Amino acid sequence: MTKQAREPQWRTSTYTEAQDCVELASLDGAWVGIRDSKDPGSGHLVVSLVELASLVDRIIAGDLDL
């Protein structure tokens, strides 16, 4: 019997008021999908939960030129 993959449940932050944001989806265990909410059909990045936490920490700390 083959295991059928579920469609990811994409979500945005409850703080999001504009359309210019990213969406996240939990993927099989310790992986997260990240995509552009303005163009969801263009694909997505896959990162580990550890990598996502590190990215969020760097954004909060102001380490990135965003």
Image (cartoon, rainbow, N blue to C red):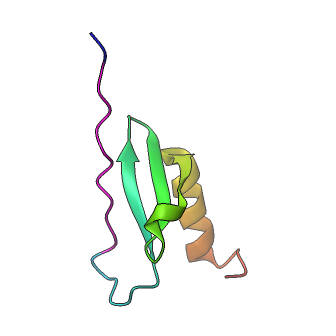
Residue, x 38% and y 35% (percent of image)?
A: 28
Asked where in the image residue 29 lies, by quadrant, the reply is: top left
Q: How many marks?
A: 0
Residue, x 48% and y 72% (percent of image)?
A: 39
Q: Quadrant of the C terminus?
A: bottom right
Which residue appears farthest toward the bottom when viewing the image?
18
Which residue appears farthest toward the front when viewing the image?
41
In this rendered view, identify the residue nearer to me: 42 or 21.
42
**x and y percent of residue 49 in the render?**
48, 46
Question: Would you say 47 lies left or right of 65 here?
Answer: left
Asked where in the image residue 45 lies, by quadrant, the reply is: bottom right
Asked where in the image residue 27 lies, by quadrant, the reply is: top left
Residue, x 39% and y 85% (percent of image)?
A: 19
The correct choice, above or below, for 30 with respect to 65 in the image is above
Magenta-drawn segment: 3-13
**x and y percent of residue 33 in the render?**
46, 52
**x and y percent of residue 37 in the render?**
43, 73
In this rendered view, identify the residue nearer to me: 8 or 28.
8
Q: Quadrant of the N terminus?
A: top left
**x and y percent of residue 60 in the render?**
55, 75
The correct choice, above or below, for 3 with respect to 17 in the image is above
The rendered magenta stretch, by its main secondary structure, is classed as loop
Question: Would you say 56 lies left or right of 19 here?
Answer: right
The correct choice, above or below, for 56 with respect to 9 in the image is below
Q: Is residue 19 magenta?
A: no
